[in-house]
Image (spheres, grey):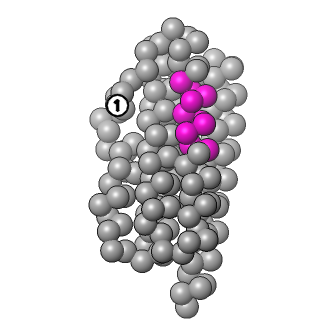
Amino acid sequence: MKDDVISTLNDLIETCKDGEEGFKTCAEDIGDSQLKQPFLTLAAGCSAAGQELKTLVTARGGNLETKSNLGGTLHRRWIDIKSSLMGKDDETIMNECERGEDVALKSYRRALEKDLPLDVRTVVERQYQGVIQNHEVMKNLRERVRVSVT
C-alpha cells in the first residue's frame, strides 16, 4: 500500500508541475496584461501544492519520481500548451488553460478514489478543492475575455 500511496502522490506532483508550467506559459502568451498576474498566482499555487506533496512523499520514505508513471499523456497535457498557443488569441489561450485544469481535476479525482491514509487524504482533498477553485477562476477569466472581445 505504501508504494501505491507514493505513486499516487508522485502522479499528483507531476500534475502540479504541469499546472505550474501551463499557467506560466499562459501568463507569457496572454495579450491582456491584466490577466498575467492571475496566471502567475495560479502557477505559484500549483508550485506550493507540489511542494506539500513532495513533503508527504519524503516523510513516508518514498522517492520523488522525475516523470509520471501513468504513461505521461494525461499529465503531460500542459506541456503541449506552449506549442499550441503560438499566435493564438486570448480566448483560445484561456480555453487551453481550462482544458489543462480539466486534466488536473481528473487526476485528483482518481487519487481520491484510492485508499489513502487519513493525513494524505486530507491534503489531497484540500488541494482538490483548490483545483476546483482554479477551474472556476479559469472559467471566469475566460468569460471576461469573451465579453471584452464581443
* Residue 36 drawn at (x, y percent): 56, 64
Majority secondary structure of the magenta segment? helix
- What is the quadrant of the C terminus in the image? bottom right
* Residue 76 drawn at (x, y percent): 35, 45
Query: Quick check: 131 left or right of 10?
Result: right
Q: How many other residues sit within 10 Å of disc 1, few (<14), some (14-19) or many (≥20)?
A: some
Foreground residue among 108 and 54:
54
Taking the magenta stretch, the answer to whether it contains residue 46 is: yes
> Which image quadrant is residue 55 in?
top right
Q: Residue at image x 53%, y 18%?
A: 57
* Residue 56 drawn at (x, y percent): 58, 20
Taking the magenta stretch, the answer to whether it contains residue 96 is: no
Q: Residue at image x 46%, y 40%?
A: 17
Query: Quick check: 43 left or right of 18?
Result: right
Q: Which residue is mark 1?
A: 67
* Residue 27 drawn at (x, y percent): 50, 61
Q: Residue at image x 37%, y 74%?
A: 88
Please, what secondary structure does the residue beneath circle 1 have? loop
Asked if residue 150 shows in the view, the reply is yes
Residue 18 vertical placement versus 80 (above, below): above
Q: Which residues are magenta?
A: 45-54
